Image (cartoon, helix red, strand yellow):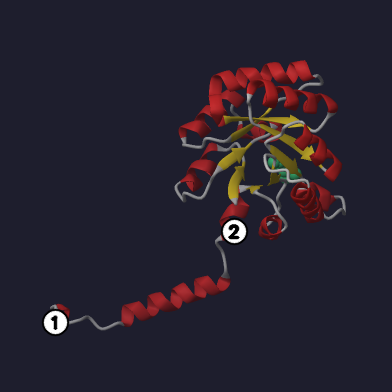
Amino acid sequence: MKIFLDTAIITDISDRVDTGLIDGVTTNPTLIFKSGRSPEQTYQKIIDLGISDISMEVVGQTKGTMISQALALSDRFGDDATIKVPCTVEGLKACQELSSNHGIRVNVTLIFSAAQAILAAKAGASYVSPFVGRLNDNSICGISLIREINEIFKVQEVRTTKILSASIRNVRDVIQSYHFGADIVTMPPKVFDEMYGHVLTDVGVGIFEKHWQEVPDLAPCDLDPV
Ligand code: G3P
């Protein structure tokens, strides 16, 4: 059960990395755009924070265009780079070549159906990324897709392709993703922060702190070993 952060904002990552709970980072062209930095600069900064699994998305209409970007990223960032390709015919051709000929981890993104996940697994993807939130936005149950892919991968004994639940909007999406078989959930930093929260925890901490202040000081002789 791994937690990835879905962001390219360096402070978002650095503020949370010392929890020891972050296993990776996913980015995409929109997130890189919002970061205000170049992709390479962003990836290097994330690596400098100690993250060793960063999804770096390639763009283009052809397998050749995607592969040349992927190889350049892989040369520069080594095993820290997971190459993200779209679930298109050309993207899956690129996935096949990168995974089988170059041993590169590939994350096939923009998955909206079980059929796409099957093809991505066949193409040697290390990760398939179903977009839960965007399905929900379109009145289709995103979590049902996680469950369906998980069931298919179990029946077919697909072990090398992991389900990476993406496009996460809230803590409920996170819980249900893990419940229904996601190996990894990539989430916005805000959702990660909200996973800690429960009103009863806050109330309980308040009560314990109050009572702790009221515990009488022990006299020094009470602390002596018997
Ligand atoms: O990892 C993919 C994710 O970034 C897409 O999220 O919120 O743009 O649907 P969203």
Asked if residue 113 can be seen in this view, the reply is: no
Q: Secondary structure at mark 1?
A: loop
Query: Residue 87: x and y, percent?
Result: 80, 33
Q: Which quadrant of the view contains residue 179? A: bottom right
Reading the image, the residue beneath label 2 is 194
Vertical relation: 172 (above or below) 126: below
Residue nearer the viewer, 138 or 64? 64
Q: Which quadrant of the view contains residue 223? A: bottom left
Quarter of the C terminus within the rendering: bottom left
Determine the residue positioned at 61% across, 21% down.
73
Vertical relation: 19 (above or below) 195: above
Residue nearer the viewer, 194 or 140? 140
Q: Measure how far apart labels 1 and 2 are at the Cα level.
A: 46 Å
Vertical relation: 217 (above or below) 35: below
Q: Secondary structure at mark 2?
A: helix
| Marks 1 and 2 close (CB-CB < 8 Å) | no
Which mark is first along the chain, 2 or 1? 2
Q: Give the residue type at disc 1.
A: Val
Label 2, residues with CA under 10 Å away: few <14, some 14-19, many ≥20:
few
Ligand 1: quadrant of the figure: top right
Asked if residue 192 can be seen in this view, the reply is: yes
Reading the image, the residue beneath label 1 is 226
Query: Residue 215: x and y, percent?
Result: 30, 82
Vertical relation: 124 (above or below) 193: above
